[in-house]
């Protein structure tokens, strides 16, 4: 190969490599980093991306150079030269990718093992997935469940995931990891949030009609605020029925869709719960049965004027269900 050709090839490679590097660096492909585990994951991403850019630069340089230098004239009908391969090049293009792919898997393996380790003083949170909602419970606080995942900042958390029906998958893009929630199994995910804020929890495994709506929030709080929340919600969940019922209402995100004066809720997606007695009369069912049914099997009767199939069935433990029903009935009866 002539020295001039080599220089031209290298110039082309540098140009394509630089262009691909700019595309990689200037566009924010990855979500903001909000967990310690993301550092390792991003390292794997960038390591792999750097390899891809190098190979892209090499391949595009050779292709463009060949098209440029070796293209045939329109009137040239002769055969190309007979080529029988090149053992040296074949060894190189087999060995180099094998080394690179091995390097990627070794780094990924190290990151996975590191990310799987929770600190000794970690917090445990149980995560239950069902069609189509998430429930989080805190083993240190009896009866406390929440529709949002609340976590203290800078403390490692071990999530124990399971599912009631089909396979779901837990994902917070800013935390970086996905973990399946499987019926009858306990899967584990370690997260150490590093930034206070509210993030999206997304179900990332197709689980049925409401899959795209199976979202909630992960709220990362200052440790003191988290401790206060845990204590207050824990007390409310174990307090008198009215208070316990309101806690169930708050923790399951009812307020995002329903209006209920007693809970300060103003949601407009679903029926106005202050009108519960009137709705029960319209449905022709006893108030208590109707209220219970509307939580456990919300599509058995949908109040006219509201969309069908939007509310997921809520599989609450019996004591929570009863507390919620009592709270709803007592609150709605008092409203004129
Ligand atoms: Cu649950 Cu998709």
Image (cartoon, grey):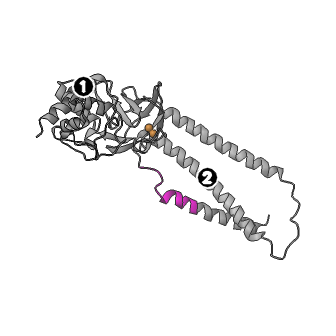
**Residue shown at the point (71%, 62%) measured from the top left:** 62
Q: Position of residue 78 (x, y in %)?
A: 88, 70
Q: Quadrant of the C terminus?
A: top left
Please state which of residues 152 and 138 is positioned toward the viewer in this rendering: 138
**Residue shown at the point (60%, 60%) measured from the top left:** 17
Horizontal side, residue 18 vs residue 291: left or right: right
Q: Is residue 7 visible?
A: no
Q: Quadrant of residue 38?
A: top left
Does residue 26 show up magenta in the picture? yes
Q: Quadrant of residue 151?
A: top left
Please state which of residues 120 and 138 is positioned toward the viewer in this rendering: 138
Mark positioned earlier in the residue sequence (1 or 2):
2
Please report the bounds of the magenta region as a residue range: 19-31
Which residue is denoted by mark 1 in the rendering?
322
Distance Cα–Cα, label 1 vs label 2: 58 Å
Q: Is residue 310 above or below residue 73?
A: above
Residue 52 is labelled as: 2
Q: Residues within 10 Å of mark 1 (few under 14, many from 20)?
A: some
Q: Is residue 271 above or below residue 245?
A: below
Q: Is residue 129 above or below residue 6?
A: above
Does residue 49 show up magenta in the picture? no
């Amino acid at each position: 190969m002539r020295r001039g050709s080599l220089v031209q090839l290298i110039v082309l490679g540098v140009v394509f490599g630089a262009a691909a590097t700019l595309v990689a660096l200037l566009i924010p492909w990855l979500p903001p980093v909000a967990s310690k585990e993301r550092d390792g994951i991003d390292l794997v991403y960038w390591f792999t991306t750097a390899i891809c850019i190098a190979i892209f630069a090499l391949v595009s340089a050779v292709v463009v150079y060949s098209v440029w230098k070796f293209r045939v004239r329109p009137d040239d009908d002769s055969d190309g030269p007979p080529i029988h391969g090149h053992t040296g090049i074949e060894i190189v293009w087999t060995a180099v990718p094998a080394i690179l792919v091995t390097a990627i898997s070794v780094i990924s393996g190290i990151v996975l093992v590191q990310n799987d380790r929770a600190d000794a003083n970690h917090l445990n949170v149980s995560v239950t997935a069902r069609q189509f909602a998430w429930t989080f419970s805190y083993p240190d606080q009896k009866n406390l469940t929440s529709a949002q995942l609340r976590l203290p900042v800078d403390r490692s958390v071990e999530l124990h995931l399971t599912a009631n029906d089909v396979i779901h998958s837990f994902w917070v893009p800013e935390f970086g990891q996905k973990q399946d929630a499987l019926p009858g199994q306990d899967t584990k995910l370690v997260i150490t949030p590093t930034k206070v804020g509210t993030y999206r929890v997304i179900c990332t495994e197709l689980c049925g009609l409401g899959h795209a709506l199976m979202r909630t929030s992960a709220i990362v709080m200052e440790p003191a605020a988290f401790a206060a929340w845990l204590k207050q919600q824990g007390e409310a969940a174990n307090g008198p029925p009215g208070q316990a019922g309101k806690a169930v209402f708050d923790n399951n995100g009812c307020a995002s869709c329903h209006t209920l004066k007693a809970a300060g809720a103003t949601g407009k997606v679903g029926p106005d719960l202050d009108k519960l007695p009137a709705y029960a009369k319209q449905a022709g069912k006893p108030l208590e049965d109707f209220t219970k049914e509307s939580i456990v099997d919300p599509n058995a009767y949908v109040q006219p004027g509201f969309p069908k199939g939007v509310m997921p069935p809520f599989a609450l433990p019996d004591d929570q269900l009863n507390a919620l029903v009592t709270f709803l009935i007592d609150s709605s009866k008092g409203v004129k």
